[in-house]
Image (cartoon, rainbow, N blue to C red):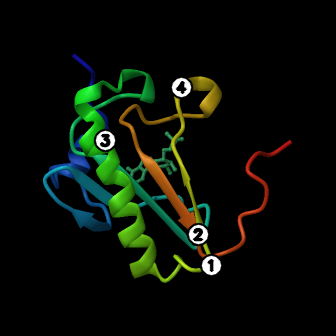
Amino acid sequence: MAEETIFSKIIRGEIPANIVFQDDKVTAFRDISPQAPTHILIIPNKLIPTVNDVTPEDEQTLGHLFVVAAKIAKEEGIAEDGYRLVINCNKHGGQEVFHIHMHLLGGKSLGPLLSK
Ligand code: 5GP
């Protein structure tokens, strides 16, 4: 059984977060340490620690992350100029919280994908 992270507490409303969207499958909230004018984390309500733990039964939920990302990008007014979606996995990916999350970053030109 995977260990819960602070994100499970955010989903349940047990600790404060600036939640911008929630339904039965996903929760989206503003990153506590934003790296761009818009920086929102979109996460499945189900605890899946990393992309390595994804199974076929997660397809619908994880597909829904993209639907929610597109909806939020539109609401944030960044859809037309564009934005970046990032999912980090494990050490080399720079993952710090082991509950899959999609970063939605935008509101300025984000530059190259990777730092040198
Ligand atoms: P990772 O490096 O795992 O892909 O990203 C984790 C993200 O979660 C970081 O951008 C970090 O700022 C954010 N984060 C960590 N703890 C909290 C928290 O308690 N609340 C919110 N809103 N964001 C958090």
Expressed as whole percent of the image width and height from the top left, the position of residue 101 reads 41, 44
Q: Which label was assigned to residue 106?
A: 2
Q: Which label was assigned to residue 81?
A: 1
Residues under labels 1 and 2: Cα distance?
9 Å
Q: Residue furthest bottom?
A: 77
- The amino acid beneath tag 1 is Asp
The residue to which callout 3 is attached is 6
- The amino acid beneath tag 4 is Asn
- Crowd class of label 3 (few under 14; some 14 to 19; many from 20; radius 10 Å): few
Q: Vertically, is 24 above or below 108?
A: above
Front of the two marks 4 and 1: 1
SS at badge 4? helix
The residue to which callout 4 is attached is 90
The C terminus lies in which quarter of the figure? top right
SS at badge 2? strand
- The amino acid beneath tag 2 is Gly
Front of the two marks 4 and 3: 4
Q: Residue furthest right?
A: 116
Quarter occupied by residue 62: top left
